[in-house]
Amino acid sequence: MTDPRRPVTATAAARAEQLVRALRGGGTTVATAESLTGGLVCAVLTAVPGASAAVLGGVVAYSAELKQQLLGVPASLLERHGTVAAATAEAMAEGVRARTGAGWGLATTGVAGPDPLEGHPVGTVHVAVAGEGGTVSRALTLGGDRADVRAGTVEEVLALALERLS
């Protein structure tokens, strides 16, 4: 279990280091669009020395309204699928990429708990990566408490990004 005061795991830190190295090596950049992780993905990336050459920044859009306003997620998509959906994660990743000019956009959305949301149980998560060649998402079912779900989400979105970059 992760310590709720330190929700970033050693695995996430190692993946962040790999991702920053890959981005720098490829001469490209990344930006994050985060909901349930509340900025943890961007924080773990910017903790890597030299990250400023690859990480443009991040948007924490916890509410549906901010997902629309800051990331350009269509209201119709949110009405149809809700905030806890692959389509929403994909639109968030595409939106942050477009609005920041980043080569890659990473997104997280889901239910960290303690209560279900939109009929989805705690641990239901969607992560997405948008970049050259399109957008991919992954549905996750994570266990544990709120800190565990958030930490697992950070690990998984970084893993998906590394898969896309390799």
Image (tube, rainbow, N blue to C red):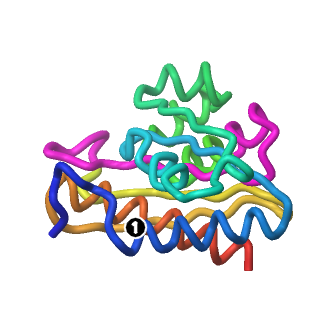
Q: Is residue 149 magenta?
A: no
Q: From the viewer's perspective, is residue 142 above or below residue 30?
A: below
The C terminus - image quarter: bottom right
Residue 126 image position (x, y, % from top left): 46, 57
Left or right of residue 47: residue 27: right
**Crowding near the residue tagged with mark 1, few <14, some 14–19, many ≥20 C-alpha atoms within 10 Å:** some
User: Which residue occupies the foreground of this view, 15 or 128?
Assistant: 15
Tell me which corner region of the image, top left, top right, bottom left or bottom right, holds residue 94: top right
Residue 162: x, y in percent?
63, 73
Residue at image coords 19%, 52%: 146
Amino acid under disc 1: Leu
Q: Nearer the viewer, residue 131 or 88?
A: 131
- Asked which secondary structure carries label 1, the reply is strand
Q: Quadrant of the N terminus?
A: bottom left
* Magenta-colored span: 94-119
Is 99 colored magenta in this rendering? Answer: yes
**Is 42 located above or below residue 101 in the figure?**
below
Query: Where residue 8 sits in the image (x, y, percent)?
Result: 33, 59
Taking the view exactly as shown, the residue that stands out farthest to the front is 49
Q: Please tell me which residue is depicted at 74% across the width and 43% down the height of the picture.
A: 97
Q: Which residue is mark 1?
A: 140
Q: Nearer the viewer, residue 83 or 20?
A: 20
Left or right, 138 with respect to 105, comes to left
Residue at 65% from the left image edge and 45% from the top image edge: 31
The spot of residue 82 in percent (x, y) is: 45, 38
